[in-house]
Image (tube, rainbow, N blue to C red):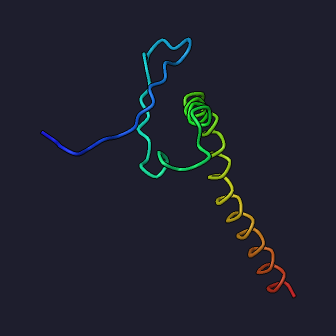
Amino acid sequence: MVKGISRQVIVVHPQNEKLFDQAIFILKDSAVGEKGITDEVLLKEAGALLNGTRSRQNAVIKLAGPLWAGCGALLTGIVWLLTSVL
């Protein structure tokens, strides 16, 4: 038996979902007492996670690193080619 543990949760029932009945989000302790976080903000964030809009935003951010690495490699190759020709 665990004593003294209290967690805040949000239970969301997705619309038109065939596989899942509900999603349960456990709030961080820091988010519970923070000012400016209302119930609407929490539900909007949970809905964004359910709809996958957050994962698309993260996918764009994850793509930026390899893109910059590729540009750096291309620039290094061009500089190397120019120095070897000249």
Q: Nearer the viewer, residue 53 or 78?
A: 53
Q: Residue at x 35, y 40 (%)?
A: 7
Whether residue 84 is situated above or below residue 31 in the rendered picture: below
Whether residue 22 is situated above or below residue 33 in the rendered picture: above
Whether residue 38 is situated above or below residue 78 in the rendered picture: above
In the image, taking residue 3 as reference, residue 29 lies left or right, namely: right
Image coordinates for residue 12, horizontal then vertical, percent: 48, 23
The residue lying furthest to the right in this view is 86
Image coordinates for residue 51, horizontal then vertical, percent: 60, 28
Q: Residue at x 62, y 52 (%)?
A: 62
In the image, taking residue 7 as reference, residue 58 lies left or right, namely: right
Q: Nearer the viewer, residue 75 or 84?
A: 75
Assign the C terminus to one quadrant of the image. bottom right
Q: Quadrant of residue 84?
A: bottom right
Q: Nearer the viewer, residue 56 or 16?
A: 16
Image coordinates for residue 14, horizontal then vertical, percent: 52, 18
In the image, taking residue 23 as reference, residue 81 lies left or right, namely: right
Image coordinates for residue 72, horizontal then vertical, percent: 72, 70
Q: Residue at x 18, y 43 (%)?
A: 3
